[in-house]
Image (cartoon, rainbow, N blue to C red):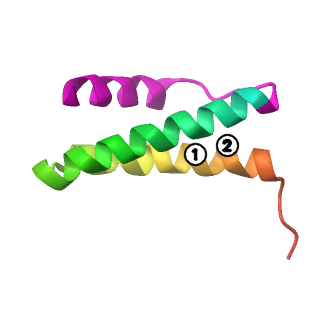
Amino acid sequence: MNKDIIAEAKEYEQKKMSFKTTDERIFASRKLKALILGLNEIFKETKDKEIMDLMKSLTEKKKKVEVRLKGRQSA
């Protein structure tokens, strides 16, 4: 199961993030969150630096997707 999550996360990391509809963005945000949480559980056990880097990368992508969902906030 751990290898499945890692493989799926790496695949998602390489995937181009061009979501046309709000539904696609919502799905992507939820999927990224699930992957990050799964990787976090693995990281707690292994303390593997590669997994941490993968989580950071996915977190950045998730933030970008959420900015598109919520809209840019003016200060």
Type of amino acid at the residue the image marks with label 2: Val
Disc ID at residue 62: 1
Res. 47 visible in picture: no
**Which quarter of the figure is the C terminus placed in?**
bottom right
Q: Position of residue 11 (x, y in %)?
A: 41, 22
**Magenta residues, dominant SS class:** helix
- 29 above or below 44? above
Q: Check if residue 28 falls in the magenta segment.
A: no
Disc ID at residue 65: 2
Identify the residue at horizontal 21%, vertical 25% (top origin).
3
| Name of the residue lying farthest toward the left | 46
Q: Check if residue 18 falls in the magenta segment.
A: yes
Res. 42 visible in picture: yes
The answer to whether the residue labelled 1 contacts the one labelled 2, judged by CB atoms less than 8 Å apart, is yes
Identify the residue at horizontal 38%, vertical 47% (top origin).
37
Identify the residue at horizontal 25%, vertical 48% (top origin).
41
| Name of the residue lying farthest toward the right | 74
**Horizontal side, residue 54 vs residue 24: left or right:** left
Type of amino acid at the residue the image marks with label 1: Lys
Q: Position of residue 70 (x, y in %)?
A: 79, 52
Q: Position of residue 38 (x, y in %)?
A: 33, 41
Describe the element under mark 1 as helix, strand or loop: helix
